[in-house]
Image (spheres, grey):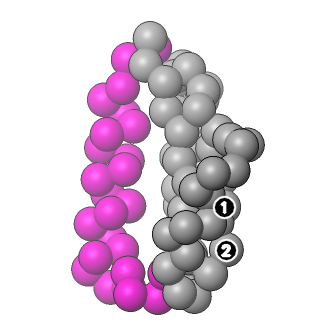
Amino acid sequence: SSSMTGEKYTLVIESLKFMLLNLKDTDTFGLITYATSVTTVSPPIQMSEEAKKKILKKIEEIKVGGSTNLSGKIGKKRD
């Protein structure tokens, strides 16, 4: 959401990258963003070097904006 501008956004992105790069190939990772709309950045997938590269690119594309739709995924089927 737009409340995540500046340093908060930078810290979240850097934390996501750090976490992702430290996952093992036996780990599973998925990412959903909440702004005005709810977006599945990556469905839960098993980590591999290729998967990490793909998700890192998607993390770089995350934009700040809108409001926070926290209830957008509650009760809905996972993508």
Q: Is residue 71 magenta?
A: no
Q: Which residue is mark 1?
A: 39
Q: Quadrant of residue 24?
A: top left
Q: Judge whether residue 6 can be spotted in this image.
A: yes
Q: Quadrant of residue 37?
A: bottom right
Closer-to-camera residue (19/70)? 70
Residue drawn where x is 55% and y is 67% of the image = 71
Residue 17 vertical placement versus 62 (above, below):
above
Residue 11, image x, y percentages: 27, 66
Amino acid type at mark 2: Ser
Q: Residue at x 68, y 41 (%)?
A: 78
Residue lying at the far front of the rendered structure = 75
The magenta stretch is: 1-25
Q: Residue at x 71, y 43 (%)?
A: 77
Q: Which residue is mark 2?
A: 37
| Residue at disc 2, secondary structure | loop
Classified by dominant secondary structure, the portion drawn in magenta counts as helix
